[in-house]
Image: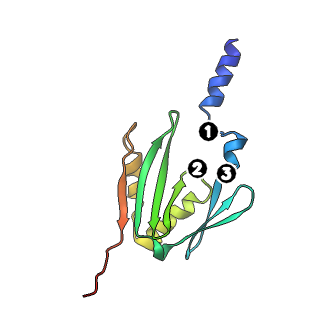
Amino acid sequence: MTSRLVQFFAKLFSRQRDDARNLYESACLIDDAGLDFRMRDGLLVPGFYWSEVTRIETYKLDLLTYDEVALLFTTADGCFEILESQTGFKDCFAQLEQQFGLSPEWYFQVMEHAFETNHRVLYQKENIRSN
């Protein structure tokens, strides 16, 4: 009985997700132009071009046994969230410095305090008005 209880909690708090949830997870396909998503079933979902990004936010998700950093990109077409556990997150991380001049220090600031979301706005495009 104790063994099954331990197995139950180990499965509950493990990083492995069940197949039903994995069906809709995606991988980030990143290049110098922008970002797209490849769904687990192979479907390619268009994302955005780096030039379309108007705002970048980051925050930390507390998932009990581990924390996960999330990036939220805002464009005129909507918001796109990318999680640290997704394939391609590290490539996205590198593009933030290349495309927006963001130092990698933001990651450590977000991860710093346990049990806090540590929300930060990393980038806000300036609106240019013409008179």
Query: Label 2, label 3: how many angstroms apart (C-alpha)?
Result: 14 Å
Of labels 1 and 2, earlier in sequence is 1
Residue 15's disc number: 1
Q: Is residue 9 left or right of residue 131?
A: right
Of labels 2 and 3, earlier in sequence is 3
Residue type for callout 3: Tyr
Residue matched to label 3: 24
x 54%, y 51%: residue: 84
Local SS, label 1: loop
Residue 85's disc number: 2
Between 70 and 112, the one lying in front of the other is 70
Query: Label 1, label 3: how many angstroms apart (C-alpha)?
Result: 16 Å
Mark 3 neighbour density, 10 Å: few (under 14) some (14–19) many (20 or more): few
Instruction: Give the vertical position of 128 relative to 84 (above or below).
Output: below
Mark 1 neighbour density, 10 Å: few (under 14) some (14–19) many (20 or more): few
Instruction: Give the vertical position of 103 relative to 15 (above or below).
Output: below
Q: Is residue 117 left or right of residue 25?
A: left
Between 48 and 94, the one lying in front of the other is 48
Please identify the quadrant where the C terminus is shown: bottom left
Mark in the foreground, 2 or 3 = 3
